[in-house]
Amino acid sequence: MNTSRRSALKTAATFAGVSVLTSSKVRAAEARDFYVAKNGRINQSLVTWNFRPLTIPELAKLSVKFGVKSVELVGPEHWPMLKELGLKCAIAGSHGFAKGFAQPDQHAECLKVLEQRIEQCAAHGVPSVISFSGFRKGLTVDDATKNTIEGLKKIAPFAEKHKVTIALEMLNSKVNVEMKGHPDYFCDDMDLSVRILKAVGSPYVKVLYDIYHVQIMHGDVISRLRQYKDYIAHYHTAGNPGRNEIDDTQEINYPPIMRAIAETKYTGYVGQEFIPVKADKVKSINESVKLCDV
């Protein structure tokens, strides 16, 4: 047996073992008591990348069990499966945070991806698609702002035509840990992000309010979500520090934040995007659902 084939078989066996282990945890969750969201004030959703090795079908199954209404940032190939289970995809992915509208030479690629995804969203009833500013790369704030406004103005009429909201995500630029922060990311400020939205002037171009990132860059999470409620298309959760569970191991108090969101008459979705550090990911997800069901 050659080395590459032996390596491939070893990798396949490893992933098979992970799949069996993960599935057993899902079955264990079904057999024990778990919390089911019942209050209906917050529409909850599960992001997927952060809960690996749980698969998208497994997360969809757990969503049904836990009373969660959506599994998000998954590709169109998964949307029929979600529909069969009575679930939504609250927000679709697009061009990724590494590229964005701050850089004029990246506009064409971002626009192409967004147009395709918006058409798919419109056809399948997905209400929103994520977008990003990308990185400054030495640009002044004024130049990056101008470029981002120009880029979003190009796609706004297309979003309006298809009635799909573009959600520009604000990310923190302080934490230099992969997937926990993004140094040099341009839209790292909620006030700046909303100024850009106001200049674009479209009801179908809004902001993704990630509570974890806002806490790191600003604090004042509740004050800011109240202030900018008309510009928020979507929310994400995670604990700080660490982007881990949203329980009492971290500094953000989620139940009052969820109550404040509900009080703004927000009818969109709150996506759980924390990265669990505890061994029982299923339990962590269920506990987060309970905390946010205010």
Image (cartoon, helix red, strand yellow):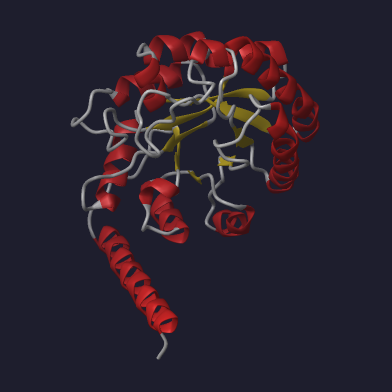
Point out residue 120 in the picture as x, y percentages from the top left corner: 72, 47
The residue most toward the front is: 138
Q: Residue at left 42%, top 50%?
A: 63
Q: Quadrant of the N terminus?
A: bottom left
Asked if one can make out residue 197 in the rendered structure from this viewpoint, the answer is no
The residue most toward the bottom is: 1
The residue most toward the left is: 249
Point out residue 91 in the picture as x, y percentages from the top left corner: 57, 39
Q: Is residue 139 left or right of residue 54?
A: right
Point out residue 188 in the picture as x, y percentages from the top left corner: 48, 20
Identify which residue, 28 or 273, lies in the foreground.
273
Identify which residue, 42 or 102, lies in the foreground.
102
Asked if one can make out residue 91 in the rendered structure from this viewpoint, the answer is yes
Q: Is residue 147 above or below residue 72?
A: above
Q: Is residue 216 above or below residue 4?
A: above
Q: Residue at left 55%, top 37%?
A: 98
Q: Quadrant of residue 133?
A: top right
Q: Quadrant of residue 81?
A: bottom right
Q: Is residue 167 left or right of residue 15?
A: right
Q: Is residue 173 left or right of residue 20?
A: right
Q: Is residue 271 above or below residue 254?
A: below
